[in-house]
Amino acid sequence: MQQRVSLITLGVRDLAASCQFYQNLGWQMASNPDDDIVAFNLQGSALALYGRAELAKDAQIEFADGQYSPFTLAHNVNSPEEVDKILAQAQQAGGKLVKPGQKAFWGGYSGYFADPDNFLWEVAHNPFSGLGPNGEFRWGGHDQT
């Protein structure tokens, strides 16, 4: 697994309010504000806001105090096969497989593992957000203009 974080997803209680907060900071959205997930491109990565319940459903878990935090770190790769390879590598390194790699409702392929402190990592192949030549991630596969 390369040493990079592609996408940080925060599981939020009120998507509209959280979106407004980041916009009030001067951040520009990279996604459609009517989507179920709101993204902001950062330098070399992106921050996404996603409903807490939807995030739990996607990871096939329930958030409980002391178990999983309501956010994920994402590591995007170039193929579904690479997703499976990294999930196996994470298990071999002492991580816990939370959700095996599988086709995702949004059209890609992803799975989840938890690190020793139960921080969730999503490993994903997103055919709509290809990686740049240095592995850099951009929401929607492009820079903001």
Image (cartoon, helix red, strand yellow):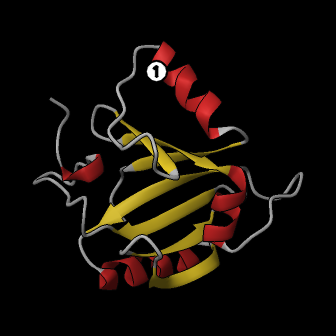
Q: Nearer the viewer, residue 58 or 110?
A: 58
Q: Is residue 23 left or right of residue 18?
A: left
Quadrant where the image shows the N terminus: bottom left
Q: Is residue 130 left or right of residue 4?
A: left
Residue at the outermost top position:
25
Q: Is residue 142 left or right of residue 53?
A: left
Residue drawn at point x = 37 percent, y = 43 percent? 32
Number of numbered labels in the structure image: 1
The 10 Å Cα crowd at callout 1, few under 14, some 14 to 19, many 20 or more, is few
Q: Quadrant of residue 91?
A: bottom right
Residue drawn at point x = 54 percent, y = 80 percent? 92
Report whether residue 129 is seen. Answer: yes
Q: Where is 144 relative to 25, above or below?
A: below
Type of the residue with mark 1: Gln
Residue at the outermost right position:
65
Q: Quadrant of residue 125?
A: bottom left
Residue at the outermost front position:
34
Q: Residue 72: where, in percent of width, then height?
A: 58, 53
Report whether residue 5 is seen. Answer: no
Q: Residue 71: where, in percent of width, then height?
A: 63, 49
Q: Residue 39: where, in percent of width, then height?
A: 42, 41
Residue drawn at point x = 60 percent, y = 34 percent? 16
Q: Where is 126 relative to 20, above or below?
A: below
- Identify the element where label 1 is drawn: helix
Residue drawn at point x = 47 percent, y = 85 percent? 102
Q: Nearer the viewer, residue 120 or 88?
A: 120
Dot 1 corresponds to which residue?
A: 23
Quadrant where the image shows the C terminus: top left
Q: Residue 128: where, in percent of width, then height?
A: 25, 63
Q: Nearer the viewer, residue 22 or 125?
A: 22
